[in-house]
Amino acid sequence: MTVLVTGGAGYIGSHMALALVDAGQSVVVLDNLSTGFPWLVHPNALFVKGDCGDEGLVAEIIREHGIDAIAHFAGSIVVPDSVADPLGYYFNNTVKSHALIRTAIRNKVGRFIFSSTAAVYGDAKDNPIRETAALNPVSPYGTSKLMTELMLRDSAAAHPLNYVVLRYFNVAGADPQGRSGQSSQRATHLIKVATQAALGERSHLDVFGTDYPTPDGTCLRDYIHVSDLAHAHMLALDYLRAGGASTTLNCGYSRGYSVLEVIEAVKRVSGIDFEARLQDRRAGDPAMLIAGAERVRQTLGWKPALDDLEAIIAHALAWEASLKGRATQAA
């Protein structure tokens, strides 16, 4: 049995590939390298450069490698970019997912794990947000992910396909062994950007919005360590292989930190002060996103091992410093 990991040269997908290899499983990584990096792929995983929307290529991989499950991470993830380029996001996240799901069904791959997002909830009225909350995305990014969720739901009703949708809250940190981390220099994730500012790679950090209805006026987010998230995917794979029914699960720690709290934590962990500039709100950002994550614990038996903001930041800082060293060596 072999798992196909789309987007496996990217941030979260590469951690899933690491977890699979660590567990002794056979892995094929498919990535078009538009935002991924081949050096993030574990050497024991087979890497194929290509697009998840290429039905002929995906079908060939399934047949040649005996793929029994697909973990789908490929896609575009920057909320403001989705507001500026909605059609690009619908094509990359929805149209290509349609092609991938169709290819899975045609080639009798009956297990599918989908990388979704808390952005499907939009500006939720109640926090923590549970899976039963209204789905009302406020950005094309969130809508593009929700459309894929709906395609999976309807396809599973019509075909022998079981899936697990994992709705991520804010993913951060890096592999504790230093093998992978958030590597895109264009990343907009707060902890990534703050570590870059701490290490002098940015002149400052922008804080988008200080007038939200939160204790300090900045957005509240539930930060989950990427390795804990990869572990949730591994449990989802075990669940599907054991015959588990299709389900949708939130992934978070059920605790929120504000933007200003995260900035102060990064300064504390790094021992470095840096400038934070207050800006207007950014389009598509809800005030608060905190996971109601009881269901993932009950369904998969998931128990986070790295639920600590300072540990998340320390791993992110170590990874950012290693990237800085890599760039220096390349120069």
Image (cartoon, rainbow, N blue to C red):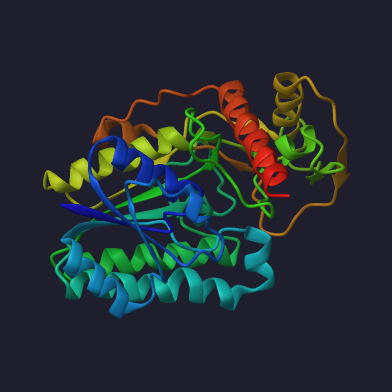
- Closest to the observer: 175 or 247? 175
Does residue 106 sit above or below 126 in this rendering?
below
Q: Splitting the image into 4 quarters, where does residue 49 fall? A: bottom left
Does residue 12 sit above or below 24 in this rendering?
below
- Closest to the observer: 94 or 126? 94
Residue appearing at x 32%, y 71% in the figure: 100
Q: Is residue 202 left or right of residue 95?
A: right
Residue appearing at x 66%, y 51% in the figure: 187
Q: Is residue 121 left or right of residue 25?
A: right
User: Measured from the top left, where is residue 181 in percent x and y?
Assistant: 54, 41
User: Measured from the top left, where is residue 287 in percent x and y?
Assistant: 67, 45
User: Measured from the top left, where is residue 254 in percent x and y?
Assistant: 49, 30
Does residue 312 sit above or below 141 in this rendering?
above
Residue appearing at x 55%, y 71% in the figure: 89
Q: Is residue 120 left or right of residue 196?
A: left
- Closest to the observer: 170 or 8? 8
Residue appearing at x 49%, y 24% in the figure: 307
